[in-house]
Amino acid sequence: MCTIVWFRSDLRITDNPALNLGFKRRGPVVPVFIWAPDEESPWQPGGASRWWLHQSLQSLQGSLRRLGSQLILRQGPSLESLRSLAHDVGADAVVWNRRYEPEVMDRDSKIKESLRTEGLHAESTNGALLNEPWTIQNQQGKPFQVFTPFWRHCIARLNPPLPLVAPESLAAPKSWPNSIPLESLNLKPHIPWDVGIHNAWSPGEAGAEKLLDRFSGTPFDVYKEQRDRPDLLGTSRLSPHLHFGEISPGQIWHALRNRLEPSRNPEWKSSQYITELGWREFSHHLLYHFRHTPTEPLRDAWKQFPWRSDPGQLRAWQRGLTGYPIVDAGMRELWSTGWMHNRVRMIVASFLVKDLVLPWQDGARWFWDTLVDADLAQNTMGWQWSAGCGADAAPYFRIFNPVSQGERFDPEGRYVRRWIPEIAKLPNALLHQPWSASLADLRSANITLGKTYPRPIVDHAKARNDALAAYASLKKTQKTEEDGAN
């Protein structure tokens, strides 16, 4: 009755259904993590995700040791690694929590079928979502493509089970099998960028619990008012912990309910933050039902959109050198910390796809490599929303003005000054549009436009008109095709 628990994006011991399955079988439990990035192609973990994974695995190793257990590390292929490990420890079962990326689901189905054919008990369960994608349908029996009715449907039936407590101990096998060193996976980057991310985060289950404890107090109460302010600590910052499964959405749900429902916030289920959990659910719903969307628009007409190609402008956007302070601050925050405030994500995405008219796929790929919370479902939904080509998408005529967005959401300039110190001496009235400053103001702030800080790489007003013209062209082409079909 030896059970292999295959850890993946569920790097925790509390509220872990797969670990609980192994524990309930009352025999030895052998936890394993298998590094097989090629099996997730073309969406192998990016550089920032690999850094986080190293730290999270290290944390999980410590948690399992405290239970009298160990985390066995192997390199793929996954099926061969599981077969070999089952032989080494005499296991009769392999259990895991499901993932929902298309390539991974295909791989997992084949592994489950193969293991069962070979006489092993193979079982998977839900450890990542409040509702699995195939359980939610609209009245026509089809997937939702608009968030509001989707979440209204979900919230009416949602009653997540209480989180599972962590086992006090795990039975060990007679002898532990070989395990490769964590360092041999070469997950950590050897560049200065690693330092900034390390200073910004505490990966692991304990780090997630600490953030939830902080957020469930006053920050939750003022979340709706402060969530759009990048200069304030107004968000939970739990997204990477959720992505790596160091905390479950069920744990967050029940923690907020227990602390807020009795006295302080009886309407907590309709709160803005719980709605954000709903957007996470919606993104997985979309990815499962529309598996082509990481690289192709959900709306077919958008395949004909006249995207530009400009490697120089793309590079300026990536490095935070566009000349628009709120955009550049966001891109520099991303490069330094592996994370970006959600409001700023919308601003920088709008700038790429609407001011520069560069493909949303270029932005999605850059975020995939640089975000510690790079999640295929949410990354895809976010970029298609910004481009206007996805489900529940922003209308294309909604084009964020980077100046007014900066003035509105960073009114004192604290966010911009933190990430763009070379323009920090400008007064608030000029900070978000330094090109409008007089020569005297620039000299006083030690700024030479084009040298110490770039001039804008595009004129926003002209870029907006060009983007709207491109959208009108798409609509005209679509109408011509429809008329021809009739």
Image (spheres, rainbow, N blue to C red):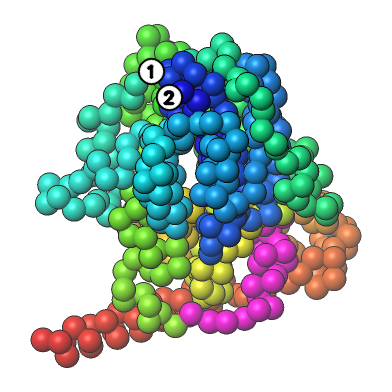
Indicate the amino acid at tag 2. Leu
Q: Residue at x 46, y 23 (%)?
A: 1
Where residue 468 sits, quadrant-wise, is bottom left
Per the image, the residue denoted by label 2 is: 21
Q: Which residues are magenta?
A: 307-333
Q: Residue at x 81, y 60 (%)?
A: 441
Real-space Cα separation, disc 1 to disc 2, in angstroms: 16 Å
Q: Give x and y (percent) for residue 168.
A: 56, 11
Q: Is residue 177 visible?
A: yes
Q: Residue at x 18, y 53 (%)?
A: 142
Where disc 2 sits, the SS reads helix
Give residue 162's mark: 1
* Along the line of sight, the residue nearer the viewer: 120 or 192: 120
Relative to 36, say whether 166 is above or below.
Answer: above
Q: Residue at x 12, y 47 (%)?
A: 139
Where disc 1 sits, the SS reads loop
- Please say whether residue 404 is one of the residues in the magenta stretch: no
Q: Give x and y (percent) for residue 447.
A: 85, 63
